[in-house]
Amino acid sequence: MIIVTAGHVDHGKTALLQTLTGTNADRLPEEKKRGMTIDLGYAYLPVEDKVLGFIDVPGHEKFLSNMLAGLGGVDYAMLMVAADEGVKPQTVEHLTLLKLLQFKQIILVITKSDRVESKQIVQLIAQIRQQFPELATSPTFITSAYTGEGIDSLREYLSQLENTAQQDKPFRYAIDRVFNVKGSGLVVTGTVFSGKVSVGDEVYLSATQQTVRVKGIHAQNQPAESGVAGQRVALNLATDLTKDDIERGDWLSELAASYATDRVTVELTANDTINDAQAVHIYHAASHTIGKLNVLIRLPDTLLAEVILDKPLFMAVMDKLIVRSGDDQHTLGGATVVEINSPKRHKRSPERFAYLQKLLTCQSSVQRILCYLQQQALPLAQVQWVEQLTTEQIYCLQKQAQLEVFRDWLYAENYQQYQQKLLLSALEMFHQQHQDQLGVSKARLWRMATLNQPMPLIFHFIEQLIAEKKLLQTNGWLHLPQHQITFSAEEQQLWQQVEAEFQKTDQPIWVRDMAQILALDEDTMRSFMYKAGKMGYLTPIVKDRFFRQQEIQQYALWLKNYLLEHGEVTVNEVRNHFQFGRKLTVQLMEYFDRSGFLRRKGNVHLLRDSDSF
């Protein structure tokens, strides 16, 4: 468990920790020389069956960014006030930050008690409690690093604190230092935000999206086989990376760190006036970037705002942020992330505001996920990252909330019903406007009705509609059951003749050639062959040049299997396989490109949508 110590410079934080733990938290030569903690200092206290870790954060205003790196993933704080100096500017600043980050408990510690009379200390405590109502009921200790007064009582109290860190969540770790150790290699240090890591684990590094292996662990300054949430941990990494490849603010995580975001929606508790489109500094764990804050809704005690970041950060819902002014001189407020990847459009619509206000009422992952999935499907891995859920937790949640999973997509039943309604409505309108056409392809129906939704998922919904007989598929064309196009008796006889000619060759046939073969007027033949195309019997790969649909399906199947194995295909490879001329092969490949089945990249063709045929 980790406890933050905060307070004004030279109010005895480091000295108290040294007396409490026997460790001098001033790590750097510059810190010892100047007598102040510049970077995060750490000290450890073994008590009973656990080790308490203390982060001694800097008190000097110039080093505030380093202090903020120490405030992530920690629930308890000690606010130090020197008995002989009382409340100072950094005291107020640090207390504000502790409040804004919603620490579970702030312990008031009066230091340097040996320097003043006890009456003065009583007056100081009364003044603090009056000036800061949030400290009125805080545990309070009077101490002196010089005489030892109050040290034992403080140590005993701290030993009884409960570790409330999220140990049941996936492992997530914010890096604040990286260095090499001779004989061991690359080492990083940081705070475990959630979960557990053990020697031998493979974890993802956010900077590279690659995994690294943990070959050694020091937890709370002791060699260990594992580290858990709420601990200060050093990890020795087995990797080809150098310390220059990793920087402060990077993350190690159990889940693949593939969801960095530069747009988040936050609930902000303001400490100062917040203006719309305001330039801000954003602090998140050990990360720091600049950005712009747009106010969305002003609520009675808080406000909802969109934060657009200068660089993407790896955030999760419920993460805490500190928002500071554009010149980084004043703390504007503390924020809680309520939404990752906020939309770029329609962000001030009534529907959007209603959604956000509903999201604020959600008290659990289940409630939030149901809210996310009201009108959209989401990748399972994205939901898992945003809510920081283990694989077991996400599947338990899926059953609990009666959610559906198709491939890698998570969705609710009402979402499926809504999308299928859109599909059927779009097809009905198409039939009304194009009564001479049997129907449309899957890809075209997706584009017509649900273009902004995941294609594989919509195709899955279409297959379900077909299985339920709410949609029919005839020769590859989708249509409503009541909509039919048929040949007249005369046209049926002509079709038998046309089909017989196609059966004689593996080549496509031009309209003019078919008209000549069957001794018919070319315009009449053209009209008939295009009608056969609308009914799904024929497919024009270019104007007036037709294959039978079943041949197109066979060619598509071969291409799909070939591309799934090889990744790309050239015109020459297709020509050699089918023994076509080059011109025909080019026409066929361009048809598949236009249909959305393939896409051209230079001189090769790639698979775009394997479900198109």
Image (cartoon, rainbow, N blue to C red):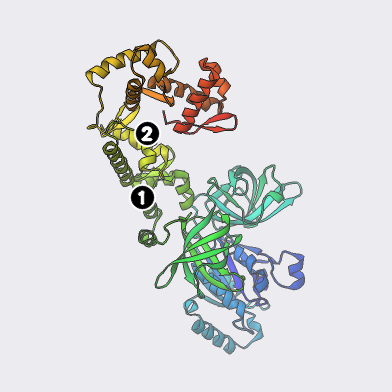
Disc assigned to residue 421: none
Q: Considering the image in quadrants, where does the C terminus appear?
A: top left
Mark 1 vs 2, N-terminal side: 1
Is residue 158 among the parts visible in the rendering?
Answer: no
Q: Are marks 1 and 2 in contact (CB under 8 Å)?
A: no
Residue found at x 66% / y 52%: 188
Q: Considering the image in quadrants, where does the N terminus appear?
A: bottom right
How many marks are shown on the rendered structure? Answer: 2
Left or right: residue 136 compared with residue 9: left
Work out whether residue 144 or residue 421 is closer to the camera in this orientation and state it.
Answer: 421
Image location (x, y in percent) of residue 370: 36, 51
Work out whether residue 402 or residue 510 is closer to the camera in this orientation and state it.
Answer: 510
Image quadrant where residue 111 sits: bottom right
Work out whether residue 454 or residue 194 is closer to the camera in this orientation and state it.
Answer: 454
How crowded pointer 1 is (Cα within 10 Å; few <14, some 14-19, many 20+) is rated as: some
Residue found at x 65% / y 63%: 42
Dot 1: element = loop
Work out whether residue 151 or residue 239 is closer to the camera in this orientation and state it.
Answer: 239
The amino acid beneath tag 2 is: Lys
Name the residue tied to disc 1: 375
Dot 2: element = helix
Above or below for 393 versus 92: above
> Which one is closest to the eye, mark 1 or mark 2?
2
Image location (x, y in percent) of residue 217: 64, 50
Q: CA distance from mark 1 to mark 2?
A: 21 Å
Name the residue tied to disc 2: 442
Residue found at x 36% / y 35%: 460
Image location (x, y in percent) of residue 230: 55, 58
